[in-house]
Image (cartoon, helix red, strand yellow):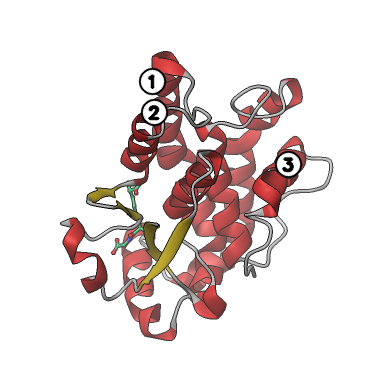
Amino acid sequence: MIALYELKGKADRRYSLFSWRARMALRHKGLDFESIAVRLSDKSVIEFSGGKTVPVLKDKDTVVRDSWKIAEYLENRYKDAPPLFGGDIGRGVTQAFNTWIDRAVVPAMLPVIVADIHERVQPEDEEYFRQMMEKALKTTLEESRAKRDAAVLQLGRVLMPMQEALKRQAFMGGAKPAYADYILFSVFQWARVMSPQELLGPEDPLCQWRERMLDLFDGFARNVPTA
Ligand SMILES: N[C@@H](CCC(=O)N[C@@H](CS)C(=O)NCC(=O)O)C(=O)O
């Protein structure tokens, strides 16, 4: 069985956004996996990977760390299963999309939900999480919460191009979901698992797309502990 090493919060929540990319990619390929919990402040369980970030995937003797490398590994190793990228051009465009999401959308979502995430990490990880995030955001969690309305407006501006794209096609991948969808979805699933805020109104094309994503693989992402 494939093992996926990932962060675990309070009430068994799996909250690493990058790990949600790997989770969805595994289900897309029709692969089952065992989830192995990693603590944010104690990475000894993933020492064998040679790094300190999750997700880490272990498939028999193969160890892969980094969500993008995991997607490429699954695509190369499980060629007969449904494709994640759709050929070399699709792989290239998806890699560019991955970078844009990481550099534009993730930083826009983080200040909106960071204080909510802090309330739901394991108690022993709270201080580590606070220090890491306050350094990254150059502000306290309390200040982030106080400035949340401005952060929500900025997030809306960043998401606008994708709302437009989803008026023309059902998924980032076109008619069917592909790895590009899992990249974007990971950001919303991160928020859904760790924050009680309603970020998308029912009329928003992104909300309707997210519902389609939550329906995939028999409600795989819907039926998990959330905030
Ligand atoms: N580029 C990496 C980023 C992974 C990453 O930053 N993971 C976070 C959790 S979402 C992590 O493990 N952080 C631990 C730390 O920085 O100590 C990927 O796509 O897998």
- Image: 174 above or below 185: above
Identify which residue is drawn at 67% across, 24% down: 165
Q: Which residue is mark 1?
A: 92
Q: Earlier in the sequence, mark 3 or mark 2?
A: 2
Looking at the rendered structure, the kind of residue marked 2 is Gln
Pointer 1 local density, CA inside 10 Å: few below 14, some 14–19, many at least 20 = few
The answer to whether the residue bearing label 1 lies less than 8 angstroms from the nearest atom of ligand 1 is no
- Where residue 210 sits, quadrant-wise, is top right
Which quadrant of the figure contains the N terminus?
A: bottom left
Q: Secondary structure at mark 2?
A: helix
Q: Is residue 134 left or right of residue 163?
A: left
Q: CA distance from mark 1 to mark 2?
A: 5 Å
Q: Residue furthest bottom?
A: 123
Identify which residue is drawn at 64% across, 70% down: 227
Q: CA distance from mark 3 to mark 2?
A: 23 Å
Looking at the rendered structure, the kind of residue marked 1 is Gly
Q: Which residue is mark 2?
A: 95
Marks 1/2 in contact by CB < 8 Å: the verdict is yes
Looking at the rendered structure, the kind of residue marked 3 is Arg
Q: Secondary structure at mark 1?
A: helix
Pointer 2 local density, CA inside 10 Å: few below 14, some 14–19, many at least 20 = some
Q: Secondary structure at mark 3?
A: helix
Q: In the image, residue 149 lies at what x, y percent?
A: 64, 57
Q: Which residue is mark 3?
A: 212
